[in-house]
Image (spheres, rainbow, N blue to C red):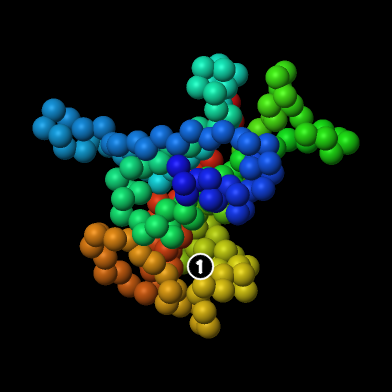
């Protein structure tokens, strides 16, 4: 997968240097006998997600000859412009870390493959709009959104002055839902969060 190799070479040099092998599985949602979608392609903790990655088990390393397995929602993938597809792959790779011992030496399995683990996202946002409606700024989800926005607004240069996501993408071929300004920022972060798969 060209974009995987490019993201690894450009942004994940340690993974590239170790020639970590990542299988990418494009997952389609389950369908009924009429071909209608009856559930999400990928779920994590009961929530539909765009993708996830897990460290391969010992058996998978041997049988599939990969060190990590990435799953991507195939239909969602097709709605993304190529820049966002690259960002999604980059995101999943960001979860992968190579473990080192106390001396800073790469830990290795028998056979010399590096020992991998996954790291969690820098943030996860969940919440109920109804709870924010009832409790306002005191709702924990409202506090989290405010903290995220205030804490990161200097970092999120793409938002520009005033925090408007003027350059924000972009799904292809999907209808844009009209929402109040207040919810736009919430949904901006909330839509299709990718999540950490359990380390196996
Ligand atoms: Zn993630």
Q: Considering only vertical position in the picture, is 182 above or below 77?
A: below
Q: Considering only vertical position in the picture, is 121 above or below 129?
A: above
- Regarding residue 128, the answer to whether it shows in the image is no
The part of the image, by quadrant, that contains residue 40 is top left
- Name the residue furthest right: 103
> Which image quarter holds the N terminus?
top left
- Regarding residue 5, the answer to whether it shows in the image is yes
Which residue is painted at 52% across and 63% down in the image?
145
Q: Looking at the image, which is closer to me, 22 or 193?
A: 22
Which residue is painted at 29% across and 45% down in the image?
75
Say how many tags the image has: 1
- Name the residue furthest bottom: 161
Residue 107 percent location from the top left of the image: 76, 30
Query: CB at mark 1 closer than 8 A to ligand 1?
Result: no
Which residue is painted at 39% across and 57% down in the image?
82
Which residue is painted at 35% across and 64% down in the image?
170
> Which image quarter holds the C terminus?
top right
Q: Looking at the image, which is closer to me, 192 or 182?
A: 192
Residue 120 percent location from the top left of the image: 60, 44
- Name the residue furthest left: 34
**Secondary structure category for the residue under label 1:** helix
Is 100 left, or right, of 4 in this rendering? right
Q: Which residue is mark 1?
A: 137
Q: Looking at the image, which is closer to me, 170 or 15?
A: 15
Residue 151 percent location from the top left of the image: 63, 68
Residue 30 percent location from the top left of the image: 26, 32
The part of the image, by quadrant, that contains residue 59 is top right
Pointer 1: residues within 10 angstroms few (<14), some, or many (20+)?
some
């Amino acid at each position: 997968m060209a974009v995987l190799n490019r993201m690894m070479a450009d942004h994940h040099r340690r993974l590239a240097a170790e020639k970590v092998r990542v299988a990418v599985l494009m997952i389609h949602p389950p369908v009924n006998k009429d071909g209608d979608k009856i559930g999400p392609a990928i779920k994590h903790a009961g929530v539909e997600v765009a993708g996830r990655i897990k460290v391969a088990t010992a058996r998978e390393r041997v049988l599939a000859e990969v060190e990590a397995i990435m799953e991507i929602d195939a239909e969602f993938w097709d709605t993304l412009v190529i820049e966002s597809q690259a960002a999604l792959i980059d995101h999943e790779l960001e979860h992968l870390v190579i473990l080192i011992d106390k001396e800073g030496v790469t830990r290795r399995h028998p056979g010399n493959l590096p020992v991998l683990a996954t790291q969690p996202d820098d943030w996860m946002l969940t919440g109920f709009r109804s709870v924010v409606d009832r409790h306002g700024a005191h709702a924990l989800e409202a506090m989290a959104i405010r903290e995220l926005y205030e804490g990161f607004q200097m970092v999120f240069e793409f938002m520009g002055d005033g925090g408007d996501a003027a350059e924000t993408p972009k799904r292809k071929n999907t209808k844009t839902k009209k929402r109040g300004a207040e919810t736009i920022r919430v949904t901006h972060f909330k839509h299709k969060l990718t999540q950490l798969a359990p380390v196996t």
